[in-house]
Image (tube, rainbow, N blue to C red):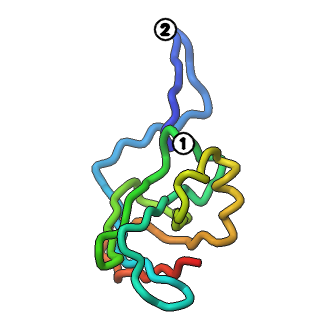
Amino acid sequence: MRQTVKVESGRDVQGVRVVLSTQVGSLTGRIVSAQSKKVLARIAFLLAPVDTTKWSFRQGFISAYTDISGGFTVKGAPGEYLLFVISNLQAMRTIDDLKKMVPEAQRVTLKTTPQSEVEISAP
């Protein structure tokens, strides 16, 4: 994702790929309870890149809340993400805390082209 690269004057930098784009991916949907299928209003969720080597609390994540009807629209860099429903923000202190939740996360895609709304079932 986004990382700082220090380039000293007169030096070459190897292994770096810079991508500049005006394209933005988006995803629209709603989050419901897996048990009751009731919408989860005003609940926090987080999108993290599928590639865990790109995880950093400083950047790369997309976070938001659902609206009163459980709906959401998020925009960000196009690509594959894991969507985590966060019921206890206080418990999220480290990247390792998030990695423990990977089995419950749902894979989603932010696309630059229109797509159907998704329904996410939260544990």
Which residue type does callout 2 highlight? Ser
> Visible in this render: residue 83?
no
CA–CA distance in space, label 1 to label 2: 30 Å
Where does label 2 land, which residue?
A: 9
Which residue type does callout 1 highlight? Phe
- 31 above or below 57? below
Residue plotted at (52% across, 81% down): 121
Looking at the rendered image, the disc whose residue lies closer to the viewer, 1 or 2, is 1
Q: Earlier in the sequence, mark 1 or mark 2?
A: 2
- Left or right? Give the position of 45 relative to 112: right
Q: Are marks 1 and 2 in contact (CB under 8 Å)?
A: no
- 39 above or below 54? below
- Is disc 1 surrounded by few (<14), some (14 to 19) or many (20+) residues within 10 Å? few
Numbered tag placed on residue 82 in the rendering = none
SS under mark 1: loop
Numbered tag placed on residue 57 in the rendering = 1
> Visible in this render: residue 117?
yes
Residue plotted at (38% across, 78% down): 30
- Report x, y in % for residue 98: 64, 55
Residue plotted at (36% across, 74% down): 41
Q: Nearer the viewer, residue 51 or 58?
A: 58
Q: Nearer the viewer, residue 15 or 90?
A: 90
